[in-house]
Amino acid sequence: EPEVTQTPSHQVTQMGQEVILRCVPISNHLYFYWYRQILGQKVEFLVSFYNNEISEKSEIFDDQFSVERPDGSNFTLKIRSTKLEDSAMYFCASSYYVYEQYFGPGTRLTVT
Amino acid sequence: KQEVTQIPAALSVPEGENLVLNCSFTDSAIYNLQWFRQDPGKGLTSLLLIQSSQREQTSGRLNASLDKSSGRSTLYIAASQPGDSATYLCAVNRANNLFFGTGTRLTVIP
C-alpha cells in the first residue's frame, strides 16, 4: 500500500541553524501539507501546497518557513533560523483532492 | 475560527466493552471529517473519513457518525481490545486544511 515517507526521523539542531525536513508524498497525490505537533499539544496546520505554489498557510508559517517541491517526488519544509520553540514533531501529509489526507510517520525536531 | 473539542480527554475501559468518543466543532462549513489514531511518539493513522454529505461511515469494529448541523461527530468502537489503546483524534477539513482536536487517550484494560 502506498505511504508517505519522511526523513530524517529525528533531527537535532542548534538554535539559529537552518534545517530541511524531507517528505515523499504518495505518487498520484496532488495536494501536500505540513503540520506540526508540539509535545502534549494539538496537531496544527502549517501550510498546504498545490500546483507548485502555496494554497494556504497558517499564522505559524511566517517568513522563517518555506516549502518546495524540488522534483517530481520530494516535498521539503525549510526552517531558516531555528528557535527553541520550533521543537516539535513535524508531519507531512498528502491527498488526491479534498479527500482523505494520509500522514507520514513524522520528523522529531529538537532545537537546543 | 474553527475550534474542535474532544470529550473525554481520557478513557479507561475493560476489554470487550463498547465505547463512544465524542468530537464537536464550531463551524459547520466543512468538507469532511477524519478520525485518526496516534500511538505514543508515532504518526497519525487515518481510521475513517466522513464526507460532509454523509451521516455515517463504518470500518470493521469502528463506526463514525456526523451531524454537521449540530457540529458533532462520534466514533463508536465495538468490543474493545487492548490493541485499541491509543490516542484518537478527530479533525475537520475546512478549505483543505485540517483542524484537530486535542484527542481522547483510550486505555483498554485486559
Image (cartoon, helix red, strand yellow):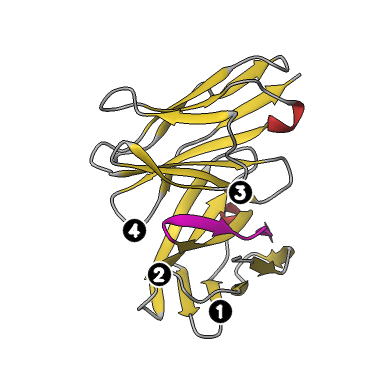
Q: Are marks 2 and 3 in contact (CB under 8 Å)?
A: no
The secondary structure that most of the magenta stretch takes on is: strand
How many marks overall?
A: 4
- Find disc 2 in the rendering and name its residue: B50
Residue B107 — which label?
none
* Amino acid residing under circle 3: Val
Alpha-carbon span between mark 1 and mark 2: 13 Å
- Find disc 1 in the rendering and name its residue: B71
Q: Residue at x 53, y 34 (%)?
A: A106
Where residue B4 appears, x then y in whole percent? 62, 66
Q: Residues within 10 Å of mark 2 (few under 14, many from 20)?
A: many
- Find disc 4 in the rendering and name its residue: A99
Q: Residues within 10 Å of mark 3 (few under 14, many from 20)?
A: many
In the rendered structure, which segment of residues is drawn in magenta? B95-108
Instruction: Say above or below: B20 vs A51.
Output: below
Are labels 4 and 3 on one chain? Answer: yes
Alpha-carbon span between mark 2 and mark 3: 19 Å
Where residue B94 appears, x then y in whole percent? 46, 63
Say which element carries label 1: loop
Q: Is residue B107 magenta?
A: yes
- Residue furthest to the bottom in view is B69
- Residue furthest to the front in view is A63
Residue A43 — which label?
3
